[in-house]
Amino acid sequence: MLKRAKALFLSLLSLVVSLPALGSAVVETSTRQLNMPQGVTEVSQAAYDIHMIMVWVCTVIGVGVFGFMFYVMYAHRKSRGAVAENFHENLVVELLWTIVPTIILIVMAFPATTALLKVYDTDNPDIEIKVTGYQWKWQYEYLGEGVKFMSELRTSDDEVYGREPKGEHYLREVTEPLVLPAGKKIRFLVTGNDVIHSWWVPDFGVKRDAVPGLFTAGWAKTDKPGTYVGECTELCGQGHAFMPVVVEVKEQAEYDAWLANKKAEAVEYASTIGKEWTAEELMTKGEGVYLQSCAGCHQADGNGIPGVFPAIKGSPIALGPQIGHIAVLIDGVPGSAMQSFADQLSEVNIAAVIHYQRNAWGNDVGDVTQPIDVLNYKQSK
Amino acid sequence: MAHGPATLADGWRAYISRWVFTTNHKDIGTLYLWFSFAMFLMGGAFAMVIRAELFQPGMQLIRPEFFNQMTTMHGLVMVFGAIMPAFVGLANWMIPLMIGAPDMALPRMNNLSFWILPFAFAILTSTLFMEGGGPNFGWTFYAPLSTTYAPESVNFFIFAIHIMGASSIMGSINIIATVMNMRAPGMTYMKMPLFVWTWVITAFLLVAVMPVLAGAVTMMLMDINFGTSFFDAAGGGDPVLFQHVFWFFGHPEVYIIILPAFGVVSQIIPTFSRKPLFGYSSMVYATAAIAFLSFVVWAHHMFTVGMPIAGELYFMYATMLIAVPTGVKVFNWITTMYKGSLTFETPMLFSIAFVILFTFGGFTGLMLSIAAADMQYHDTYFVVAHFHYVMVAGAVFSGTAAIYYWLPKWCGKMYNETMGQVQFWVAFIGFNIAFMPQHFLGLAGMPRRYADYGLQFADWNMVSSIGAFIYGGAQIMLLYNVIATIRNGKPTTEEKTWEGAEGLEWTVPSPAPYHTFEKPPEFK
């Protein structure tokens, strides 16, 4: 009986040991990572160091306590003829195992405090970036530079739902990464637009909750250019697992070139607002925007989800006056999950998506919404 | 009929009436235990859905929206439906027997506090079938995801929470009243069995914090339906306020779950060591110290929310302190075994596994208390692993130990020892395969409540899922063992099932008669 149980256990063990080999052929990232990353900033290094101190303190205590326990379980078993003694207290021992752990904790409090002070050392940054969590994407704004953009998951639904093979960077790729210069102290001001998100880059040791109505600060400074991937770590709805953080750290010169390019793009964009768009252009662009920003709730076919997200197909807003439709997108619907898209989407994109919603799936309003209409509404407020 | 419970032989109506109208602490204890086991299986089924979806990267079985409902319902059902009622059931059965009381002090309230529970969970579970789905905002239901952005069924969730809270408060008042007033002559407070002590302290915690939870959900109700803005920043409210209120309830809540488990283990280890509990009074003081500390550490669940550093430091230091009384308890249990005469029947195996795995969970808890490191651990699978080590290997293992330990007393039948031990090993191995890898996943960067994950997490998720299925199977074995014992177990009439058992509950016949201690027993 015992032998068979042992054999079973061994075969189970071998199963467990051999399993990790199955999935690893496709992955180049470190599938065997078992420990916290050391990361590339002072903060992540501090977190790693205090983590390792704790691991070793716990290991030493654990080996001692469990070692003694296993000795007792072996030596004082009835089957070996052990006879129970009757003692049930000992003041000295009891005081000792209260006082000694207290002292260990007090000693550990020192490095723990030092590490935390480092996390909070957000003063005197070279660059400030406002990070805003949206359902389900991140917006990065380079304060004082006039550059801001959205960063969304690039992995396709087909990969998620298994209709296409998963790429090498599955769920670790975005439309536009956050770009930072090496060697500069960067302060992140993190906030949320709708629900609470949390912005985490493990290699920076930065995890800050993105709470609507509140700014929380974190900082990073690294000399190592590279791509660092993080996640959203506060449950924020159905897209929680699908809004990764990707940060690219570049050398200063490369960063400067990138920033100049972004600024030029912003100027160029401003000139397109006044342009007259054709219905076809808006329809094509609008479909893309709709699938990216609206279909998550209202569904690709415009039918919504009954009881949760209203349909756009045949809705009074989509079939009603244009101005009302613009108002919903710019102002949101207070008290509901419908947020304001004024800061999330450009005027061109808002105009395009409104045009699309008013003229797709049998919504045949037939009017054309121009970016300038959106801009006028915004400025009228 | 007046003396003795109706059985099936008296007809269905009489039999059902007995259970519906019962005021007998043993009947109500049995109801609580069966109900909690049913909820345990349901919550477990939700967990199986979660682990099946996470078996591989990509969405294979369910949609992310439903995945979130599963994680939420798994947490709510396990905490409020399985673990808490299970220990209330044990308290109902055992506290009167342990203190030599004829019944609970408030028997009709006892009936009420049980019978509102099935309605609460019927309401909660029914939300899964409603338009828009059930609660999908996690068992911690952070606003505004649980208010402005919640499905409409959130109102039913709030109502269910209110009912559960009322049930818990009534159960607690009953336990406090019973222990304060109905102890056998000679049983002073410092002679009470430790299970009774831990439950009294737990009951005080419950009475203190369940109203706070009720306050939190009531504010949610107002925000959702009556236009207030307690948690809505746009209206001058604060989403972080919700977290403070929730965790002011939530942290004591985790000790509400674990303290009775401490009590169970403190009964079982002396029995199978054939030696009195070491450090009885320090056990009582340590329990009280843990209960006190549980009120002043809540914001360690919120280290990343952007508190000022003074607040972070305070909550870090206070949290680290909990290791001291908890350590005292572990040392006491081990020293109880030291120089005892140990045997390893199923209840003892579960209790030893409890001590080892709970201590392991305590170590990761200590690591989590270090705020700087918590910036990396927070909301990852490291946390999931941590709290399953203390909740499952802690509370559930000790509950299982209690079932094997007292089952012969309850039904007068002995369980099959081999089957019990097989179940233990399957549960022990399955548990560790399921949850040990989650530490690695968390440290490597996998956040919790993720419906899908990058390819670098694939291997350990698959291992974890396999372990979870094994552990789930172990619960079916437990159900089988209990039913097989009740139906075909070897009858035992000995008062003392276990050689080393001490206490008043072992002075009554097996199975325990419907009415016990109608005259107070002598307690030396």
Image (tube, rainbow, N blue to C red):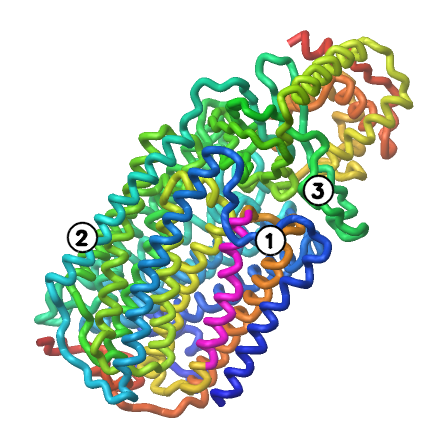
* Residues shaded magenta: B422-444
Structural distance between the alpha carbons of marks 1 and 2: 51 Å
Disc ID at residue A99:
2
According to the image, label 1 marks what residue? B128
Are the numbered discs 2 and 3 placed on the same chain, yes or no? yes
Q: Secondary structure at mark 1?
A: helix
Q: Are marks 3 and 1 in contact (CB under 8 Å)?
A: no
Are the numbered discs 3 and 1 placed on the same chain, yes or no? no
Q: Chain of mark 3?
A: A
Q: Closest to the observer: B500 or B260? A: B500
Q: Is residue B204 visible?
A: yes
Q: Are marks 2 and 3 in contact (CB under 8 Å)?
A: no
Residue at image x 47%, y 78%? Answer: B423
Relative to A263, say whether B428 is above or below.
below
Q: Closest to the observer: A156 or A369? A: A156
Q: Is residue B218 visible?
A: no
Horizontal relation, residue B3 to residue B34: left or right? left
Structural distance between the alpha carbons of marks 2 and 3: 60 Å
Quadrant, the C terminus of chain B? bottom left
Structural distance between the alpha carbons of marks 3 and 1: 15 Å
- Give the image quarter of residue A295: top right
Mark 2 surroundings within 10 Å by alpha-carbon count, few (fewer than 14), some (14 through 19), many (20 or more):
few
Total number of numbered labels?
3
